[in-house]
Amino acid sequence: MDWEAHIERWSRNAVRLLDIRQYRVESGTVPDRYVAQASFFVVTTHGEARVSLSGTAHQTRSFHILHGGAGVELSFMPMGNDFAFYLILYKAECVSPEDRESFQMSYSFTPYAMLPLQEKCQAMDRQWNQTTPLDKLQAQSAFLPFVYEVMRQMRTSATENSRRNVVTEAIHYIHEHYRKSITAEELAGFYNCSASYLSRLFKNQIGVGPIEYLIHVRIHKSKQLLLKSEARIQEIASSVGYADVYYFSRLFKKHIGSSPLQFREDNRPTVQYNPLGLLKSSIVSPKLVSHNENESYYQYNGEGDTSMFRFSRPTFGAIMLLCTALLLSACQASNKTGAPVSSPAPTETTAANTAAETRIYEHLKGQTEIPVKPQRVVTLFHLGELLTLCVKPVGATSFILKNPLLSDVSDIADVGVPPDAEKILSLEPDLIITTGPFAEVVEGGYEALSKIAPTIIVEQYNDPIKDVEMFGDILGKEEEAKRWNEAFATKIADYREKISPFIGADETFSILNVRPDALYVYGDTNMGGNIIYKYLGLKPTEKVETDVINGETWEISTEVIPDFIGDRLFLAVNKGSEEKLKEVEKLIQHSPAGKAGRVYKVDFDQFLPSDPISVEKQLDIIVNMLVESD
């Protein structure tokens, strides 16, 4: 099905909610048979059933969505007493036969993010069943956001092979619901994970945790309202999720450096005409990257300092640069053949910084024309990969610039976290490389970045072999990438041979991380796990293999530590975790690794990154520990 065409028809035709009904087996309201009098959505919310659309059977489990047109015969065969669903009837005013046919099509799919759809159905049902016209009008206004969410998830499922990124989905939810009370626990519950797990994913993929990002969104929205409206501070505070205006004012001053009133007074005249202000916040990328379980340390439960989110007032030069970028992007013709094409002749002042040729590069957002040999790259995540191939970017996020294992980061501009579009613009990049989540948190999203320079969204593999190969292709450094991968493979083979006399055939390995209020066991992603289990081929304990590597366990309780620790233990203790370490020290000492004196302490910050430079250095450290300790 051509989802783009179907979505386009939704955007150009007038639609009207006709009715919404909720059916439950337990209340005896589920019909055996129903003939639709209008186009409809069926949204199953609980239980399991066999649902037929004009003879075509669909096995549905909560949460599931079906669509059909007028005249379609629906039949329901519930598999239990908990089955329930919403029936949403609507009418589309279509001009062309093609449009009418589109709204009559039958299809079904399973959403990957249930909560946004369920909340919209509940709101519509509640409002529609009120008696006042105003309530019914509000139900009408909730129908299109429901349709938008259905179309968004269907298109993403069709184009991304059902791979989801939890961080990107959570960012999407935050942008839609920042006015409400949101806690880390509630947000994690929406995606069936723990708050600490979601925080790790956020920290790993965009450098800040979910609550920290929520504050950024709220403060940024309040700044927009202060500059673009005459609303009272009380109204603005309430509209961004803070019922207490005094708390909001203190929080605002803490993060921005001035009170809301002072900010309005100081900034309104100068930022009114800032073109960057026209770039609306992205809600979510249409195409998402794969869910990555590699993680970084982040334990954040309160609304802490987010001074990194301060946006500077735009310079005249930055404004002119954006205008120039927009003009150039409008004048450039796109090449759809995939063959290198000549770029417009550069001026004398830019010739040294502009690639002579371009090509079409396929990435997670589609196809983009990029330089064959980019000269001024901004990377929002993959810094180590570029440095491995001897390409020093002009800009990177503070998140990756802080990697202690990357020594050559001088002269690389810090574009912040979340990245500042104005700062990126001032660097005059000819290529921007980002991941899906990082593209989301830039003001204006992927579209804003694309107006600054050709922008590609790439996978976050956290695998140096795959990453080096991918960036060799992007940067026109294929031969350099091939040489690095060959050298790395040789190094792995040499190190395997080097440690073999010191490692028993049946010895097992574990990685434990002690934090102030939690314990984590690592699998084969980072913290040395990729090196130990993947590259050196060492054995995990049975519990690590089943529950962590092949399961979804990360955080463990103190009493189960003995189940995970093997013959050798790599131990990472975070700062401030002295009390927690005392709590588990005896268990570690009485483990096989503790009794044999084979507990190796590693630096958490050094072992967290998984770029090629960091992994090589981590590999050296691990091999030296194994050899020197025996």
Image (spheres, rainbow, N blue to C red):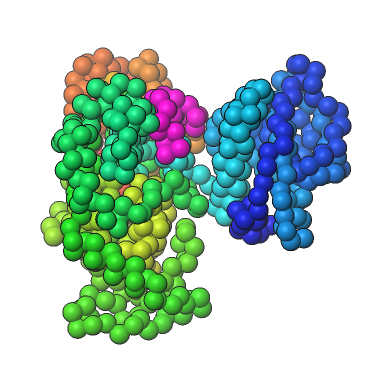
Measuring from the top left, give residue 201's x and y in whole percent.
38, 38
Q: Is residue 571 left or right of residue 285?
A: left
Residue 66 among magenta residues: no
Whether 490 is drawn above or below 570: the answer is below
Determine the residue positioned at 60% across, 27% down: 135
Residue beneath the point at 45% across and 47% down? 284
In this rendering, is residue 332 above or below 156? Answer: below
Measuring from the top left, give residue 423's x and y in whole percent: 22, 56
Q: Quadrant of residue 456?
A: bottom left
From the top left corner, tell me how far across and down residue 190 is, in percent.
50, 30
Picture quarter with the N terminus? bottom right
- Of 435 and 502, the residue lying toward us: 435
Q: From the viewer's perspective, is residue 319 above or below residue 243?
A: below
Query: In which image quadrant can residue 567 be found?
Result: top left
Q: Could you tell me if residue 623 is visible in this image?
A: no
> Start and end of the magenta stretch?
174-193
Determine if residue 550 is in view. Answer: yes
Q: Measuring from the top left, give residue 625's x and y in whole percent.
A: 21, 40
Taking depth in this image into account, of 571 and 372 the one nearest to the observer is: 372
Nearest to the observer: residue 231 or residue 75: 231
Q: Which residue sits at x=77%, y=50%?
A: 104
